[in-house]
Amino acid sequence: MAAGNEEAAAAARADFARHWQEEFPGEPAPRMELGSVRAMERELERCRRHLRRLQRALAEERFKVLYLEAALARAPPRPPGSAAAAPAPRRRPPAAAPRGSSPEGGSDGSSGAEDASSADFNYGADDYDAEGNEEPKALPEGSETMPYIDESPTMSPQLSARGQDSGDGVSPTPTDGLGTGGERDAGKGLEMRKLVLSGFLASEEIYINQLEALLLPMKPLKATATTSQPVLTLQQIETIFYKIQDIYEIHKEFYDSLCPKVQQWDSNITMGHLFQKLASQLGVYKAFVDNYKIALETAEKCSQSNYQFQKISEELKVKGPKDSKESHTSVTMEALLYKPIDRVTRSTLVLHDLLKHTPADHPDYPLLQDALRISQNFLSSINEDIDPRRTAVTTPKGETRQLIKDGFLVELSEGSRKLRHVFLFTDVLLCAKLKKTAVGKHQQYDCKWYVPLADLVFPSPEESEHCPQVHVIPDHELEDMKMKISAIKSEVQKEKANKGQSRAIERLKKKMFENEFWLLLNSPAIPFRIHNRNGKSYLFLLSSDYERSEWREAIQKLQKKDLQAFVLSSVELQVLTGSCFKLRTVHNIPVTSNKDDDESPGLYGFLHVIVHSAKGFKQSANLYCTLEVDSFGYFVSKAKTRVFRDTTEPQWNEEFEIELEGSQSLRILCYEKCYDKTKLNKDNNEIVDKIMGKGQIQLDPQAVQTKNWHMDVIEMNGIKVEFSMKFTSRDMSLKRTPSKKQTGVFGVKISVVTKRERSKVPYIVRQCIEEVEKRGIEEVGIYRISGVATDIQALKAVFDANNKDILVMLSDMDINAIAGTLKLYFRELPEPLLTDRLYPAFMEGIALSDPAAKENCMMHLLRSLPDPNLITFLFLLEHLKRVAEKEPINKMSLHNLATVFGPTLLRPSEGESKGHLTLASDIWSHDVMAQVRAELVGPGPSPCQHPEGFTGLSRWTRPCLLEVAAWGKLAPGSSPLSGPNPPPICLPQVQVLLYYLQHPPISFTELKRNTLYFSTDV
């Protein structure tokens, strides 16, 4: 073990020596302890201390050089012929570039013009933090947390003015020459005050110009906000530009007061009161800082949803300084919003240096002291409120690598699904997994791979054919798991309500987390492929195209910059991976069991959505929308409109019913349909249609839980999609109310309809099934995918009216609408097809374990149905079997079909259910709960095990139970759901229908001929 550690340390030292030689050719590499993370942390701390000392010394020497340059520039010329003297230095030694700077601009993200035109002093915000850690502030672009404000002015400012005959920073000369001896010493401090103020005044002018540029679009935006076509709402404008006008007015007044004092410099001039007043107005900055993150997020969302605002915010024109050759420079709104935060630090640095060069007996001294105290207290209070985490890490070359986005994604690696934490930095995509650590130990990430963004490409659909294909988990397995999770969740709530033991609750929560983790891992099926042009490809699986689009757009936005390819050394990779833990913004796996008890549980029930129309497209296209909602911690696509061809203003007016399972958000994506056959993929879940826009709204329970429709608009990249929605709770959706209608077919008893039609099976059932088998039996997701609600309602009206054009309408109608009409017919029956009376008997019969007993019982129950119900059920049964035969094409297995139809065919009406259970919500979970309890705790007492239990059973199941006591045959402590491969948990209604679907063909005449008469004697 020790030998292995020594080898690793030697390899790390060799790697460091190689990088050192590249940076400092010919210089021997210093010895450093790199054998472990702890050793490297000690070395890092030692280097930081040394660097602070050197920085201080460098600042002092630089100050001496600049002062001497300024003094010698006004010194009297030496007479010709006099002894040669060293010429006055015209060039100062090149200073180290500020950390985080780049060839394009300064360290704070501004353009180079600002640095080039600063008159005297450049008060950089990049410095060490209060603890002495060398962590420069990151640029705000893409940042998800507040920037940390440096409150420790430990470095002297740098003079960076242009000389008269050299571009290399000769400081400007004082208007009055410095005397000799005592005069020079006495005037030194006051002259340096002027230099400090001159530099600050020049940067103040630039700052005011930046604030003006930020305010310039505000007035026209406000003017359009009250028109019929606003770019932004007044609320959005107020949020983005919050307090900017106040800050501008404060600094404009300060500049106008300070400027004449500096221009007409006099040693007796006082200006401490101006800085004291400026410091006293820092409360405005507190309000700005508190709103800063919200302002950035609002600006980003508005840019995504409104093309006009996006163009405005990308190129704001900042006026150049008076003596600058450049009249304007272009800066983004995001960069300008960061300027006030940067300015607070700079003002504090100026006060620090003014005090240094102000005599203690000068009238300004106490005023500047007071201003500095206020400023430092302000910065301290701000930093207490700001999350101390940084969003950036420094590379070995001193550049800033900022975290832009992170999140949990499922990677398909070596044929299996793995949950990864993916980190997108400004120049690299890193895929990591959290290491398993002992309790109390510091958690760390293990890097699985990384791709520099300069080398990252998205393979085309044609290229993706060579990538591994995605194995999709069958829908019925996912649905089974969801029902199992819901049942455990109900059990947890019940335990809490009854103040159950915490150990039992924790056991249930652990089981729920395991199931949710399985669902999170196995649900995603949309491929997100990335490729390293110098190496291999990687495949992630996502459940939401919205999320895939977000990742793709974030990467492509960063790739627009001038990125360079690179290879990380083992030490660099270790440092970067080590930073991920403190930089991450997503801390928990997105499962509902990770939610706090006080968090919103979301909505459960059915959301009715009408997608009306869209406008704002630049040119005609084939357009459609999809709807996504979050369910069990992740987003899934739930509905899709028809394609509206060749238009700029599609009018869909389609209604959908979406089941919500703890949902909190609704997403709408607008696509342009791709009909190019060369781009279409073969059965690999790839979505090749182009996303034209996407948007999201929160589902406010109070807003949607009304009987009336709530109309809303989502804005996306200049496109506006109009839609309406209303919510129905699960309790209400399960109600069956007997119809008083005597005409039509919907809501009328099946016996009444068949008698009126003189048929054995209702006409609507026969026609819908015939049409599905004619042209929909190979339709992917038939009966599972929702039809358009307006089409279904139109068909309902036609069947109710017995319109002669029914057949013509059926032949023209979308097949999913016809399938939806059939489901709606069975759902609206005043009594379910398998009847209220037999509901408890079916529940008891399906629970039997002995095959012979179950066969006798289930067949006897069928024989007990009224003839119209039985014949219709058998007719439907054979149809569903024929649909399932096409499962390789339509993806609808027997289990899928049983899941769709089971709860519809076997469900008590509202009136009858009161005899069995009090609430519809109880009906929903009661049957599943018993099974889950059996799996988690072991079987409880069953009426089958006790003679007295028979009194509670219906007369339909008692004869079957006499043949075999199903639970009595189980070993103690076991259950029908235990064992290495327990059957999937699903609703008993689903199990009942699945039983008959898996049964050999059942004939009506054979059933009636083989009627059995059971004894009811015990």
Image (cartoon, grey):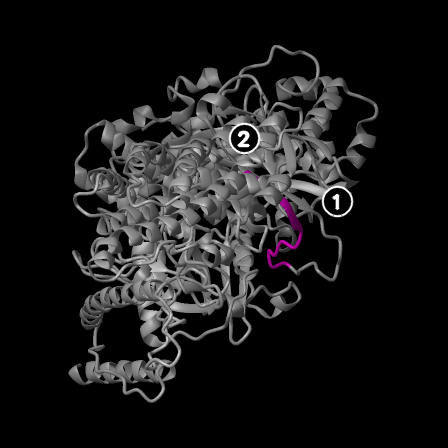
Q: Is residue 164 left or right of residue 376?
A: right
Badge 1 or badge 2: first in the primary sequence: 1
Q: Which residue is mark 2?
A: 904
In the drawing, what numbered circle is on residue 622? 1
Tell me the amino acid under the disc marked 1: Asn
Percent x, y for residue 91? 40, 71
Tell whether position 693 is magenta. Answer: yes
> What distance separates the C-alpha of mark 1 from that of mark 2?
36 Å
* Left or right side of 947 for 716: right
Q: Quadrant of residue 21?
A: bottom left
Given residues 455 and 360, the one toward you in this image is: 360
Q: Position of residue 190 (x, y in %)?
A: 27, 50
Quadrant of residue 889 in the image?
Answer: bottom right
Q: Quadrant of residue 12?
A: bottom left
| Residue 854, x across and y down, in percent | 43, 40
* Residue appearing at x 26%, y 56% in the figure: 188
User: Please, what secondary structure does the residue beneath circle 2 have?
Assistant: helix
Pick the front one: 203 or 819? 203
Above or below 561: residue 8: below
Q: Secondary structure at mark 1?
A: strand
- Magenta-drawn segment: 683-695
> Which corner quadrant holds the N terminus?
bottom left
Residue 528 image position (x, y, % from top left): 54, 59
